[in-house]
Amino acid sequence: MMGNDISRILIETVVRKTLRDMKDSPERSTRNLVDMALHFSSGPFQREFFEMAQKMLQNEHSAYYSLIQDVVSSADTDKLVSFGLNLGYNSFVAGAKTIRAVEAREHFNIPWTIRLDFHGSSYAQQADAYRSVIRQGRQLGIFTWALFPDSQPQNLLGLAAEHSDCAFLLFCRPEDITNALLDEADRLKNLLILVRYGSAAADACALLRQRGFLYAVYVPYGESDLERIASGELFCCAENLHASFTLLLAAPACTEELRRTAYEHAVRIRKAQQYRTVPMEWTFDSRFVDGIISDGACSAAFDENGDLAPRCGQPVPENCNLFTRPLRDILKEAFPKAADAGSPA
């Protein structure tokens, strides 16, 4: 458990004080926090991230100040702090250090986050296997997990409860967001719920906001959605849901070029700071983070059967199944270090 790490304890103390100050002065408090974080940053990811944030926050008219104040005033403080530290410290600092050490020693790339797809109704049959996967991932430095159940997301809450030092992103349909689900999830401090964008998302997001949960929205997209992404129309609508960020999630048939185009639009709009939601694109933003953490950017997703999913149509080695092989062996075979360490996997 990283909860007793002295560095984390000190950071948590500062963060909690800053969150209290943000309710009255979000602009000054946010800039002070970023300035302090940059001063004490040691790793390449931390410095690049906070330098970018520092530059963006020079814009006094940034919509992100309103976003920060909105999140701080509506979200449960313990949830905000715990999830934020699990992501920002356990994953991006301590976990990243482990990833770099293992990669250097064993010569294969390790993703900073892993996507797991589930048949929610039959999850109980593989629950022990998934618990083992999370434990194996933590040993490699992976502390952020994206969970995609096709139904019954409540069945996965025990996974987050057992690994309180990890950050979990739980992707849900709007109809999954009920008081019954939130009653079960309320005890968890390491969970961010993502609601599928659509006509029913407003009620789901309103309920999450009312109950103090951290949440965002995700938008499955294809080629027909590029115009709404490029124009900003999509994010203009999403900001009315008070979502902390809006995640673009490519349909399986999307080409690498299409994903890159969506990512470039998201980055452009993100830098403009016009909307009270942060645009992100799953494929390329994940790779961007991974490429800073270590010298080979890679991403990994496993389907409902435990098989490593192809990446943008690229084949994967045989027998890369979570239920039959250790995670370390799968990653070692699927993501060997290239002769040129800077080449993406």
Image: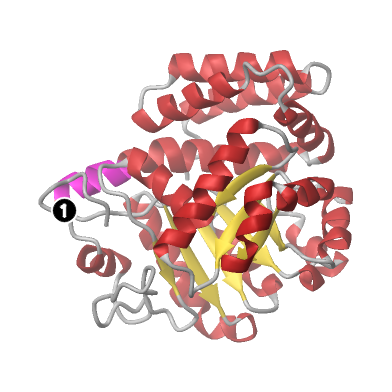
Q: Which portion, as a residue range, is magenta?
A: 98-105
Considering depth in this image, is 311 or 221 the residue closer to the camera? 221
Give the vertical position of 6 relative to 303 (above or below): above
User: How would you rate the neighbour count of disc 1 (Cα within 10 Å): few for under 14, some for 14-19, many for 20 or more?
Assistant: few
Residue 138, quarter of picture? bottom left
The residue under the point 66% across, 61% down is 219
Give coordinates of residue 25: x percent, y percent: 79, 16
The C terminus lies in quadrant: bottom left
Residue 182 can be seen, yes or no: yes
Give coordinates of residue 5: x percent, y percent: 47, 32
Give coordinates of residue 27: x percent, y percent: 73, 17
The residue under the point 38% across, 58% down is 299
Q: Secondary structure at mark 1?
A: helix
Image-based side of 266 in relation to 276, left or right:
left
Is 217 inside the magenta-drawn segment?
A: no
The residue under the point 68% across, 56% down is 228
Give the vertical position of 269 relative to 237 (above or below): above
Image-based side of 303 in relation to 268, left or right:
left
Considering depth in this image, is 105 or 298 the residue closer to the camera? 298
Residue 166 can be seen, yes or no: no
Considering depth in this image, is 264 or 337 the residue closer to the camera? 264
The residue under the point 25% across, 42% down is 295
Task: Count how many numbered circles sit on residues in the image.
Answer: 1
Considering depth in this image, is 233 or 161 the residue closer to the camera? 233
**Helix, strand or loop: magenta stretch:** helix
Residue 97, quarter of picture? top left
Q: Which residue is mark 1?
A: 106
- Residue furthest toward the left? 339
As shown in the figure, which amino acid type bears the numbered disc 1? Answer: Glu
Q: How is the image coloured?
A: secondary structure
